[in-house]
Image: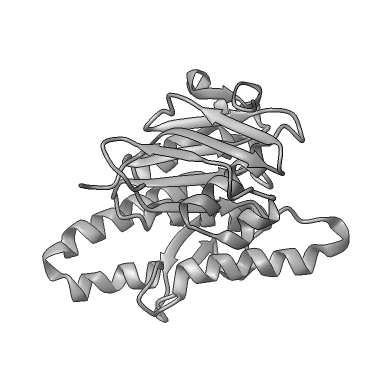
Amino acid sequence: MQNGYLTYVRLDGVWGNIDFEWKEIDPQVNILVGINGSGKTTFLNVLYALLNVDSTVLKKYKMDKSQSSTVCFKNALLPNPVYFVRSFDTPANDRRKNESRLLQELNYVLYQNKDGFSFFNYRMKILNEPSRSEEIQKNISVLFDVINEMFADTGKTVEISKDSELVFRQRELVLKVEDLSSGEKQLLLLLLTVFLQDNQPSILFADEPEVSLHISWQQVLIDNLRRLNPNCQLIIATHSPSIISRGWGDKVVQMSSIVK
């Protein structure tokens, strides 16, 4: 039996005494909203840990092993591959530390060259899987189109350098990834994570993806993530009305309806 999308979740005994129940999860887009402290981040962290059998995180949230939690998937016993993109906010008094963490995450999905999840390895498929070379080139063109459209207001365009690095040209300047703003890095991390799913059925958790993103980017974020992989089930926790503004209002789920 193949893996599947999330359809139902019940988490019992979070922090020892909080239960979550989420019925009728949409297979395409879900937008979790609620005030600070309503449980959005906790819910995503615990669900992700449960799907990845991460006992350390479950212990952190005081999950009682005697309590039963239930996660159901459409026509399957196991989930599609699950990815989690967390936002890296940058406090004024700790900018260098948080910037470096974001850059580390971004460089990993760009360049790590072992058997793993990176843009470098995806491009290598052109050589390793010649029957897919045309498809892969086309997919990369779509990615670059999305990036160029979203970076258009600053006049930046993406390209691959002679050293096989992802760089940005801005008039006569050539900018490396580390030269980009924190918002631009955050956006690239989101886009690349979904792109590298290679159009396969997948699940993406995104916690407050609007952090550091301009409103115009927030407004088209869901559309562009779906453009990069229409087979990815999006589960997004957000405070931003702009994320919802382009026709996604019917995908909003109030945390107050999930917390029991």
State the image coordinates of residue 45 (x, y, percent, origin top left): 60, 49
Q: Quadrant of residue 21?
A: top right
Q: Nearer the viewer, residue 143 or 199?
A: 199
| Residue 179, x across and y down, in percent | 64, 67
For this view, does 189 lie left or right of residue 3?
right
Q: Residue at x 47, y 25 (%)?
A: 23
Residue extending farthest to the top is 250
Task: Give percent across and percent down for residue 49.
Answer: 54, 53
246 versus 198 height, above or below: above
Left or right of 53? Residue 196 is: left
Frontmost residue, 15 versus 166: 15
Please name the residue shown 40% across and 67% down the image. 117
Is residue 173 or residue 204 the one in the foreground? 204
Residue in the foreground of this view, choosing between 1 and 69: 69
Which quarter of the rendering shows the C terminus? top right
x, y percent for residue 87: 64, 51
The answer to whether any part of residue 152 appears in the image is: no
The colour scheme used to paint the residues is one colour
From this view, report whether residue 41 is shown above or below residue 121. Answer: above
- Image vertical order of residue 28 relative to residue 181, above or below: above
Instruction: Name, please, the residue furthest toward the front.
Output: 66
Question: Relative to residue 138, is residue 37 depicted above or below?
Answer: above
Compared across the picture, whether 189 is left or right of 202 comes to right
Taking the spot 57% from the left edge, 39% from the top edge, the residue there is 217
User: Residue reaching furthest left?
Assistant: 131
Residue 218 is left or right of residue 223, and the answer is right
Count of marks placed on residues = 0
Is there any visible trace of residue 233 in the rendered image? Answer: yes
